[in-house]
Image (cartoon, rainbow, N blue to C red):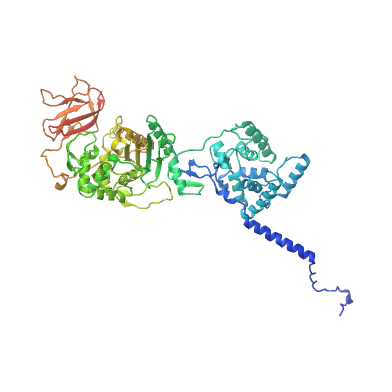
Amino acid sequence: MPPSFEGGGRVRRGPRAALPLTDKQRGWARVLLVVMLTLFTLDVALPPPLARVRDVSPVVLDQHGQWLMAFTTTNGTWRLEARLDEIDPEFQRRLIAIEDERFWFHPGVDPIALARASVAYARAGRVTQGGSTITMQLARLLEPRPRTIQSKLIEIVRAVQIERRWSKREILAAYLTMAPYGGNLEGVRAASRAYFQRDPQWLDDAEMALLIALPQAPEARRPDRRPQAARASRDRVLNMFVRIGAISRGRAAEGRQAAIPTRAPFPYSAPHAAEALVAAHEGEGVVASTLDARLQSDFEALARRRAEPLEREAQVAILAVELEGRGVRARVGGAGRERAGGYIDMTRAIRSPGSALKPFLYAIAFDEGIAAPETLVRDAPRRFGGYLPENFDRRFHGDVSLEDALRHSLNLPAVATLDRIGANRFRAALTRAGAEVRMPDRADSEPGLALALGGVGMSLEGLVQLYAALGDEGNARPLASDPLQGFAFTRRFVRAETAERVLEILATSPSPAGRTPSQLAQNAPQVAFKTGTSYGFRDAWALGVANGYAIGVWVGRPDGAPRPGATGRDAALPILFEAFDLLGVPTRPERQHEEEEVAPALVRLDAEDNGAEQLSILFPLNNTEVLVLDYGADSRGLSLSARGGRAPLTWYAEGDRVPIEDTSGRSIWRPSAPGFHEVTVVDAEGRSAHVRVRIRSSG
């Protein structure tokens, strides 16, 4: 029935039926669908090579976040990861305003900028204005191509692909990571480090302008090779800052007065430690460490200076560990890579420790009740099976206490002590403490008594770990160069009182030549130290503990060749004391030890008893200062006194025999000059005792 028009009402129509698509429209729809599917498939099958952005230069930082060392990428470029939170935000704003003002809004391609660039090209017949967005520039950096129309089209496609995958902040960070700055510098951080020696967290106007100008023509504007071109391009960008309202004309004029910087090398510190850390954190752009940059630099300079007078084949290694936490604060694997064996980390190299293990030998004997520090042992020629050890100076001292044997590093008492402990037992104790003890590569590689004198292989790292245990109340822990490492274990090596007693003995060992004993010097750390010299003078060691640190020093040749006459005391000990001086740590009170009565079973370590009291000097006391009125043959002199031993006693001072006075029958020493002197007494059986004193005028 037809609709009614009465009443002037409008006709209500039902919903209009959709017109069927024509064949032509259906064809175009199919084409569009195929194109979209094709583009989607190509996008998935041929994604942009975004992984290149992650190939960055690893940077190793110290415990305070300070640079130690950086490494180039796989293709030899300096490319440091850019993090927007660590880059001056004003620099980011100005970069976008100049390079890509609609960066935050376009989908990777800016049609307005492209149209403007096309018109300018048509009018001038050459490129006078860029139309590439930051995303398109990133696409070109990821896949460098000749600058052609075809390349530009590919960049457009790649830019759209990148925008689909990353946020705008990620794109900006990637661009700032890869932007070229001339030579092998890529990224704003690498450029800022090279030219301003700091990260781009805070930049002035001139620095911002230079960092924006360089990527536009990196080789033509390199500050280190073409400073005039760099200046001109920087000044143009300063003028652009004025046009965009970022700065005033006055500030631009001030910026133009700034000098063009030259390129500086990147920090190069702790190469051995840095290489190991980077290998353990492969693929990470920033690697933290426990090292201290200042201490590392000081110790590297110390190693270089001490190695300079040595033959070119010799190296110096230093390892410093803070006892609390066992963090490695300095690791100097060598005195320089220009020297022979410089690429070998000698803090980890396996070498013979010489006498450096003796403190732990006695510590175990004291801890297990086998002996006490006051226990006597005969220092005389003795055969242990087929082993006939002798002292380093080829002298014998008769009956000595174990503490004096350790203090003066006598070999016979050490071997006798190990004979009581057992070589396998001693080695097992060192291994439980975390030290690698490597036996000689022989068929009979079971540990023997030569273990007491260094007949095994150990590293400086392993030795420092053991000395750190003495400094930490006998607790053994692994060393840590990685702050994320944590403790693998904490084990009791020896009791706290045993560790303290051994350190007390080591702290009263004779000081190196020219060094004032800590008991006499003000503000000097009281270092408990031990030296070691391997067979054939191949390795010189010095290790010590003081004021919360354990430090080890090695001097030798990486090829293992001998260095005749180079002992641990002469070659390594002065470096150890200088290293402790560089720490700048406060001294702590001198250890006070209360004398204890020795159990009868511990009076002697060996079964022999010669019936004579141990020879010792009563006056002057060791490591003391003696005041005199005058010097020379006419002076009043000092009456020397000793106890024990077999008479007659013979005295020596300043290298000469001290005569016996006719009237008193006593030996009177008349010092010829002030300073440090050694006094020795020898009894009828050749046993001796020594003291070192400082003579000073009382006037």
Q: Nearer the viewer, residue 131 or 456?
A: 456
Residue 388 position (above or below residue 105): above
Residue 237 position (above or below residue 173): above
Q: Nearer the viewer, residue 176 or 121?
A: 121
Residue placed furthest toward the top: 634
Instruction: Give the residue at x 66% y 33%.
Output: 232
Residue 195 position (above or below residue 479): above
Residue 327 picture quarter: top left
Instruction: Give the residue at x 24% y 33%.
Output: 623
On the image, the x and y values in percent for residue 73 come to 53, 44
Residue 440 seen = yes
Instruction: Quadrant for the N terminus, please.
Output: bottom right
Instruction: Quadrant for the C terminus, please.
Output: top left
Indicate left or right for 105 with 74 as reference: right
On the image, the x and y values in percent for residue 120 come to 76, 42
Q: How many discs appear?
A: 0
Residue placed furthest toward the front: 443
On the image, the x and y values in percent for residue 530 come to 29, 39
